[in-house]
Each structure stands twice: as structure tokens, then as C-alpha cells.
Amino acid sequence: MKQLAFANYHPAVTLAYFALVLLCTMCLMHPAVLALSLLGALCLAALCNGVRTVGRQLRYLLPLMGFTALANILLVREGETVWFRLFGRIPLTVESAVYGLAAGVMLAAAFLWLSSFNKIMSTDKLLFLSGGRAPHLALLLTMSLGFLPKLRRQWTQVAAAQAGIGRSLQTGSLGQRFENGTAILSVMLTWSLEQAADTADSMKSRGYGLPNPSSFSRYHSEQQDITLLLFLLLCAGLLVVGWWQGGLQSAYYPRLSVDIKPNALLLLSGYGLLCATPHFLQRKEARVWPSSK
């Protein structure tokens, strides 16, 4: 992953950012908000994963948007503007097509936001956020997430060793493959029990379960985190004020109606700044580093 300036902020601030943009994406179905959300999600996904990866994702997301619009227009009969009648009797309305397309854009934007969330909010950040209030849950997640890659590597090694002595899972009859798979499964079960026993002994020797435990954390609140949090609160305030004043009103049924009032600039400017925040921080970091050198 490309080094992002936004990824260097405190995990709580980063989580608040993604929660805010996803909440607006899922709750505000106005076309202007959906367009800003999709554009911001595309920019952040390009920063996190690269332009080529985003291009590959769009090959699936664009058909998804088309399928959502097609499914909605075929299944929903609401709407006053009849596009045409299928088989001469089933009305296909413009309103249902537009709503299906808007729902597809919402799903695509949410997918892109979540893909960036998966890159920026690493496992250790999520465990840091949940470790203080739920230490046992954090420990369980840590052990589970760390055990799965080990299990996969051990399975590959055992399967390769079994294949070396003629007990491969890809050759032989169905009965022989089943017998070979059973032997590998038995080895994996024994290995898992040994790992569990070793982990329990190691945790006991390190004092797990004693009262008042201490923990190490490399995440600390800094001035930049407070500044970004205040900026997020400002954007959220603009969103709330714009929504409360009815700045953006949209209706898809029974007749398509999209209204943008003058006070909608509060909501659109707040959400636009919110979506562009990671990009602005990256541009700022790109200017600061050469000047510091």
C-alpha cells in the first residue's frame, strides 16, 4: 500500500471519518451527495490501492450498478412516468430505473469506502480500539487472526510432505484421496492442539489473568489528530444544519423530483470537504516533505 498521510492519524479519528462518510452515503440518497461520495471514494481507493486496482474494481462495480437498475425497473412497479410496457402489459417506469441506478451508485461508493477502510484500518488499529473496553475480545481476535495464516502455512507444508511420499490429494481414486485428506486432517488436528497448549502455557507464564494488567500501545493523540477531529466535527455540523433546513430534497416515487435549495450549499460543501479530506492531507504531505529536506 502507498504510504498515506491519512493512515498516520489516530485510529479513533480515522474510524470516525469512515463512519461519517458511510453514514451519509447510506442515508442520503440525493444524486449530488451520491456523486460526491462516489468521487471521493474513487480518489481514496486510487490512493490506497492504485489506479489499476480501482480500474479492475470498476469492471465489477459498473455491471453491479447496471444490474441494480435493471432489477429495480423489472421488480418495482411504482412511478408515474411509464417508459414502455413489457409484453404490452408490464409497465417499466423511469422513476424505478433512476432509483435503481442511485442504489447501485450507493453500493459502489460503499464498497470503495470499505475497501479503503480495509487498507487504512489495519488489524492492530482495530484491536487497539477494542482492547481497552473489551480486552478478552481483543485477545480472542488477535489469536484467531494470527492462527489462520499459521494454519494455512502448516496445511501447505503437511500436504507437500504427504505428496512427497505418494499421498497427494490430487492423484489416485476418490477413496485414496479421501484417505490422504483424512491423514492430513489428523496431523493438523494434533498440531492445533499442541499450539493451543503452548499458547496457554506461554500466556500463563507471562501473567495473563492477573489483576490490573498493562498493555503497550504505539498510538497516541497528537495535535494533528485533534485538529482533524475538530475539522470532522465542523463538516458534520454543516451536514446536520443543511439537512435540518431541508437543503437537499429528493423523491423518486411516485414522481422524480430533485430539488437543490440555496442552503444546500452548506450540506454539499461540508460533505465535499469531508470526502476530499484524505486527498488534501496527501497533497499537504507531498509539499511538506520536500521543503523539510
Image: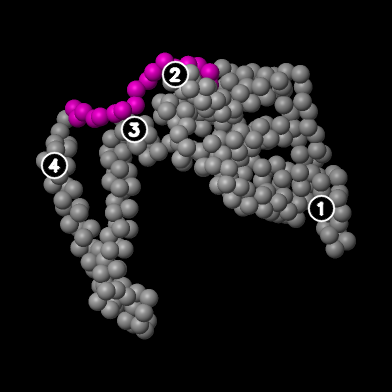
- Residue 193 vs 80, above or below: the answer is below
Hey, which quadrant is residue 10 in on the image? top left
Are circles 2 and 1 on residues that touch, CB within 8 Å?
Answer: no
Tell me the tag on residue 204.
4
Q: Find the distance from the CA under tag 4 to the CA under tag 3.
A: 22 Å
Read off the residue under disc 1. Answer: 92
Where is mark 2, residue-wise?
Answer: 292
Tell which residue pokes out farthest to the front in this image: 293
Q: Earlier in the sequence, mark 1 or mark 4?
A: 1
Foreground disc of the pair 3, 2: 2
Q: Secondary structure at mark 1?
A: strand
Q: Residues within 10 Å of mark 1 (few under 14, many from 20)?
A: many
Which element is circle 4 on? helix
Q: Is residue 224 magenta?
A: yes
Mark 1 and mark 4 in contact? Answer it, CB < 8 Å. Answer: no
In front: mark 1 or mark 4?
4
User: Mark 3 highlights which residue?
Assistant: 128
The amino acid on which the numbered mark 1 sits, given as a three-letter code, is Leu
Residue nearest the observer in this picture, 165 or 290: 290
Side of 66 relative to 134 (left or right):
right
Upstream in the sequence, badge 1 or badge 3?
1
| Residue most extreme to the left | 205
Disc 1 from disc 3: Cα separation: 51 Å
User: Mark 4 belongs to which amino acid?
Assistant: Lys
